[in-house]
Image (spheres, rainbow, N blue to C red):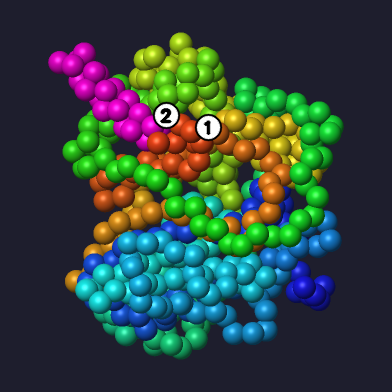
Amino acid sequence: MLWEPEDVVRVLDPSEQRFVRHATFTGRSVTVLGELDAAGLGAAFAALQRRFPILVCRIVEDADENGILLRPGHIEAVGAWVSFGDPDEVRIPAESVDPGAQLAYLDVVLAEEDRARVTLFVHHSVADAGHCVELFARLWGYYADYVETGKIAVGPDASATAGEAEPGAAREYPSSLEAMLAQRGIRRGQRSGLEAVARSLAVADSASGVERSEAAPATLARPARIQLDTVATARVLATAREQAVSVNGLVTAAVLRAYSDVSGADRVSCLYPVDLRRRLDPPVAAAAGTNISGLAAFATDAAGTVDIVELARRIGTSLHDDLADGVIEQSVLHFPDLFGPERIHSTAGHIALTNTGTVPAFRAPAGLILDDYEIVYLSAHPRPSTGASAAVTFLVYTYLGRLTIGRLGGGALAAQLLDAVAAQLSWSTADQRAATA
C-alpha cells in the first residue's frame, strides 16, 4: 500500500506496535432488547467518527513491519453495518475489517423479535479498555440523543440535526503512553518491574519466528465466561471491603489459587495492566491516549496461594510498592525488550489478567435495554507472534451488578479453570464470613 509523506501522523510506539502484527481489534458488544432504530445507530456511529477522527485514521506497515499511523483517506468512511442474523452470536463481520481503510467498525445484527446485537470494533493500537468504554458510551449517548430529540449533541454548546456535519467538535489524535511519559520527564530506568516473571532469551530464540509471513484469515476470539449473579457479586465486594483488600486483588488471588490447584504448578505468575490515566500528573482523559496502561507483575509459589485473602493483601502491597517506586510506568519503556523482533526477554507461560472494573450502564432511550456486555477480540490478519504467549488469559469486569470472568486459552486445563475460579471466590467469601461471624 502506498501513502504520501503528508499522510503520516507518526510511527507507532512499542505500546501500540504490539497490536499491529495481528491487526488486533478489541470489541465491545451488547445484546439489545427492544426496538432498535438502525438509521439512528448509523447516525450515532457517523457522529462518533467525526468526533473522534482517530477512528477513521489508518494503519499501514513499512517493509520492516513497523506500524505507521496515517490520516484518514480520501474516500468516504465506512458506516455501520446492519443485517439480520442471530444476536446470540458475536460474528466476524461479513465485510472487510481492514486497518488500512479505517480503525473502527460497527456491526449491528437484528432479529425479528426485537432483539439485536451491537458490536463496536476498535483497533487495539489506538484504544485500550478505558478508551473503548468511553467510545462505546459516547456511541449510545449519541443514539439516545437521536431517538429522543432528532439531534446528536456533540458538546456543551454544539449540536447537529441528525445527519448533518458536526460544528467544530473533532478531537486531536490520542497520544501514546511513551509520549506522555516523555512529556513528564520520565525516562527509562534499570528496572522494568517485570523481573519476577521474565526470563532471558538466547540470541537464537529472540530472532525465531519473526520472518515476514503471509497473513491468515481473520479470526474472532470470544472468551468463555462465567457470570456471578448480583447476590454472589455483592458477597465478593463485601468480602473485599471487610477484609480491606481490593476486588482486583481478591479476584487475582482466586485466579492464581485456582490455576495452581488445577495445573499442579509449583509456582504461578501473572501480568496485569494498570490504567495510569489518573495516576499521571496531570491526569489523562479516557480518550486522550491510546494504550495508557503499564504492566504489573506478581509471582508466588504454590504454598503462597492457600489463603487467598492473605494472597490478595500481598498482591495489593506489591502493586502499591511498584506504583510508589514508579516501575509500573517503567514497564512500557522496556516493551522493546519483551515484544517484537529485537526482544531479549520473555514472559511466556504467565497468567494474563485484565480487570477493567465496573462498566458504566450505557445510556439508552426509553424502551431499550442493553442487557449484556462482552469483550471480544478480532484479528483481522493474524501472523505468527513475536512476543510472550500467556498460558491463559482472564478478563474480569462488572456490568449491571454482575461480576464476569472470561477466559481465553488455557490448553488442556481450559475446561476446568473458570469453575475453579468461581469455586475459589465462593469459598473465600463463605469462609471469611464464617470466620467473622
Highlighted magenta segment, given as a residue range: 416-437
Q: Position of residue 241 (x, y in %)?
A: 29, 28
Estimate how packed mark 1 is, as few (under 14), some (14 to 19) or many (20 or more) residues with alpha carbons within 10 Å. Answer: many
Q: Residue at x 82, y 73 (%)?
A: 5
Inspect the image, locate mark 2, and give the three-letter code of the amino acid beneath it: Val
Q: Position of residue 53 (x, y in %)?
A: 58, 72
Packing grade of label 2 (10 A; few <14, some 14-19, many >=20) is many
Judging by the rendered image, the residue that carries numbered circle 1 is 351
Q: Secondary structure at mark 1?
A: strand
Q: Earlier in the sequence, mark 1 or mark 2?
A: 2
Indicate whether residue 385 is drawn in magenta: no
The answer to whether residue 223 of the structure is visible from this angle is: yes
Residue at x 32%, y 85% (from the top left corner): 150
Residue 427: within the magenta? yes
Q: Nearer the viewer, residue 110 or 293?
A: 110
Q: Look at 40% across and 36% down and name the residue there.
A: 415
Which residue is under mark 2?
Answer: 255
CB atoms of marks 1 and 2 within 8 Å: yes
Q: Tell me the CA gap for discs 1 and 2.
A: 9 Å
In-front residue for pair 112/299: 112
Residue drawn 37% across the image and 83% down it:
39
Left or right of 186 in this view: 170: left
In the image, what residue type sits under mark 1? Ile
Secondary structure found at label 2 = helix
